[in-house]
Image (spheres, rainbow, N blue to C red):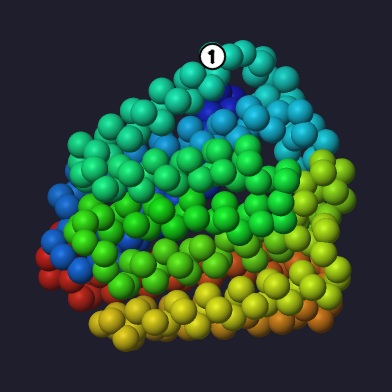
């Protein structure tokens, strides 16, 4: 049983799916208005996780040959041969996506379902099929997948656009490239062997650290913008501390440019995102009287 569970977690990329589901909940918390009922909130999070899982599983299937060339991916279910190639796999992934979209539509409305679809499509098709092996812009545009989850959560509260969720979605868009570029910098040989044109593989050692630092400075500054739209001190502290840590580590990486600094920056990106999402939740708990806390 434990072995099958481990395979499911790997195949559906459930760790990433859980993180994206949390960003959808953060989108709900960032939106001003009456929160959905608890069952609907949980159902939308599951729908986002399911759609993310479908896209992640398709990524495994589509990349099964090249995944064998990378140390970090060669143990994935298709790359390792634990799952055999079959045309039924994409059909099953499409079924999971359709079920997830139907659930999102039922509990959060059509606009939220559209955003959930766009997130899965961006990762599964735009990033995996069109850009991953063709363009250095792969993860930049692929970063929209997480942004759409934020917008889906906000649409569940109010379909009308709101400033704070849009800002949070842009921060997520800016966060993804330095997060993955830091990992790619630490594992350059892996990505080069697989022929994936991540920025640290194809750009000079002067250019890619500055690109990471530029993205980090921009997202750290922008993450404070919700304060101008009514977010309180707890949010400002979380966003400020997380952003400062990420910028500091990115600055060190720009100077040292080694594997240790790259992995430290990768870790800092996770801390920054966690603090940002905690800040959104704390602001909702302390300031949204319509939330069921």
Would you say residue 140 is visible in this rendering?
Answer: yes
Residue in the image at 26% along x and 48% along y: 111
Q: Quadrant of residue 24?
A: bottom left
Residue 246 placement (x, y as % from top left): 61, 76
Q: Mark 1, residues whose alpha carbon is within 10 Å: few (<14), some, or many (≥20)?
A: few
Residue 85 falls left or right of residue 197: left
Query: 68 left or right of 173?
Result: right
81 vs 110: above or below: above
Residue drawn at x 30%, y 73% is 163
Q: Residue at coordinates 46% horizontally, 79% vertically from top-left?
A: 222
Q: Give the image location of residue 247, x and y in percent.
A: 62, 80
| 251 lies above or below 84 | below
Q: For numbered disc 1, what is the local secondary structure?
A: helix
Indicate the quadrant containing the C terminus: top left, top right, bottom left or bottom right. Answer: bottom left
The residue that disc 1 covers is: 88
- Front residue of 259/202: it is 202
Q: Which quadrant would residue 98 be assigned to in this image?
A: top left
Left or right, 17 with reference to 178: left
Residue 280 location (% of width, % of height)? 34, 70
Measured from the top left, where is residue 74 in percent x and y?
76, 34
Residue under the image location 24 percent in, 38 percent down: 105
Asked if one can make out residue 19 in the rendered structure from this viewpoint, the answer is no
């Amino acid at each position: 049983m434990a072995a099958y569970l481990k395979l499911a977690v790997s195949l559906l990329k459930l760790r990433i799916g859980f993180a994206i589901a949390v960003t959808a909940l953060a989108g709900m918390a960032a939106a001003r208005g009456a929160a959905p009922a608890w069952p609907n909130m949980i159902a939308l999070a599951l729908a986002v996780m399911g759609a993310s899982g479908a896209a992640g599983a398709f990524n495994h299937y589509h990349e099964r040959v090249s995944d064998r060339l990378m140390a970090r991916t060669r143990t994935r279910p298709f790359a390792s041969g634990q799952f055999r190639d079959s045309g039924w796999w994409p059909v099953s992934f499409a079924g999971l996506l359709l079920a997830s979209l139907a659930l999102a539509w039922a509990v959060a409305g059509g606009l939220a379902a559209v955003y959930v679809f766009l997130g899965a499509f961006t990762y599964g098709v735009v990033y995996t099929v069109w850009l991953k092996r063709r363009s250095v812009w792969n993860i930049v545009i692929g970063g929209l997948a997480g942004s759409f989850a934020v917008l889906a959560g906000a649409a569940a509260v109010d379909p009308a656009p709101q400033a704070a969720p849009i800002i949070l979605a842009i921060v997520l868009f800016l966060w993804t490239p330095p997060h993955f570029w830091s990992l790619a910098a630490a594992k350059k040989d892996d990505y080069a062997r697989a022929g994936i044109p991540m920025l640290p593989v194809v750009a000079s050692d002067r250019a890619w650290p500055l690109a990471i630092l530029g993205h980090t400075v921009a997202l750290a500054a922008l993450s404070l913008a919700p304060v101008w739209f009514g977010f309180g001190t707890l949010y400002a502290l979380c966003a400020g501390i997380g952003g400062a840590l990420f910028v500091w580590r990115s600055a060190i990486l720009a100077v040292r440019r080694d594997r240790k600094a790259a992995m430290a920056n990768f870790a800092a990106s996770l801390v920054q995102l966690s603090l940002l999402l905690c800040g959104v939740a704390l602001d909702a708990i302390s300031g949204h009287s319509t939330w069921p806390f």
